[in-house]
Each structure stands twice: as C-alpha cells, then as structure tokens.
Image: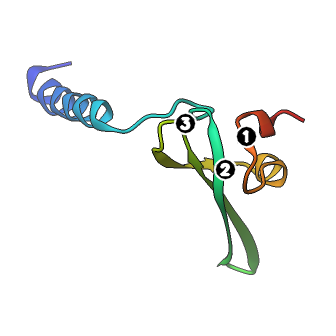
Amino acid sequence: MNKIKAAPIALVLGALAVLTGCADSHGADGDPGVVQSRDEDHWVTKSGKTRIHHYDYDLTVQTPDGKTYDIDVGEDVYDHCFTGSKYPKCTKN
C-alpha cells in the first residue's frame, strides 16, 4: 500500500480509536441493576413489493450507584425483563 492511501486510512482508524474510548460502555450484557423502564418500537418499510417489519427493544437499567443507562436487547430478553426485574439475571431463562 502506498503512503497516499495509508495516510487517510490511518487517520480514520485513529479517529475511531479516540471515539470508541469516549463511549460509555456497559459491556455486551450491560452492568447489573434494576430495570426502570422498557421501550418497544415497531415499524414497516417497503422494498419493492416486499414489506419488511423492524423491531427495536430497549431497557433502561439503574445500577446500584444510581446511574441509569439504556441497552438495546433482543425480543427474548425484552419478554423476560419487566420493570423492577434484576438485570441481567432476568435474561437467564
């Protein structure tokens, strides 16, 4: 790879590294806490004659130190984690 192509790639990778470091991360499963609220969104898009159904499931979790965060979860987790449930314990069926 020549230096002209390598410079923009290095710049983009450096920017991504900085931005990733600034993100508030709660790991793949999130920090333990209590589910404060749940949010479910459903919408339909159309591609030609095909209708595509989209679903988004989110939980708001409060950690023992009082901080809250939102986490995107799948339908199965959403179905098992109700308001007041202990997260991530509620994800285990």
Residue 52 appears in which quarter of the rendering?
bottom right
Residue 35 disc label: 2
**What amino acid type should be assigned to the residue bearing mark 3?**
Pro
- In percent of the image, x 53 and y 29: which residue is there? 27
Q: SS at mark 1? A: strand
Q: In this view, does 2 lie to the left or right of 43?
A: left
Q: Which of the pair 55/48 is nearer the observer?
A: 55
Q: Of label 3 and label 1, which has the lower sequence position?
A: 3
Residue 18 is situated, as x and y percent measured from the top left of the image, at: 22, 31
- In percent of the image, x 84 and y 33: which residue is there? 92
Q: How far apart are marks 3 and 1 (CA)?
A: 11 Å
Q: Contact (CB < 8 A) between labels 2 and 1?
A: yes
Q: Is residue 14 left or right of residue 60?
A: left
Looking at the figure, which quarter contains the C terminus? top right
Residue 86 disc label: 1
**What amino acid type should be assigned to the residue bearing mark 1?**
Lys
Q: How far apart are marks 2 and 3 (CA)?
A: 11 Å
- Is the residue marked by circle 2 packed among few (<14), some (14-19), or many (20+) residues within 10 Å? many
Q: Which of the pair 15/35 is nearer the observer?
A: 35
Residue 83 is situated, as x and y percent measured from the top left of the image, at: 73, 57
- Is the residue marked by circle 3 packed among few (<14), some (14-19), or many (20+) residues within 10 Å? few
Q: Which of the pair 21/59 is nearer the observer?
A: 59
Residue 60 disc label: none
Q: SS at mark 3? A: loop
Looking at the figure, which quarter contains the N terminus? top left
Q: How far apart are marks 2 and 1 (CA)?
A: 6 Å
Q: Contact (CB < 8 A) between labels 2 and 3?
A: no
Residue 6 appears in which quarter of the rendering?
top left
Q: SS at mark 2? A: strand
The residue indicated by pointer 3 is 64
- Is the residue marked by circle 1 packed among few (<14), some (14-19), or many (20+) residues within 10 Å? some
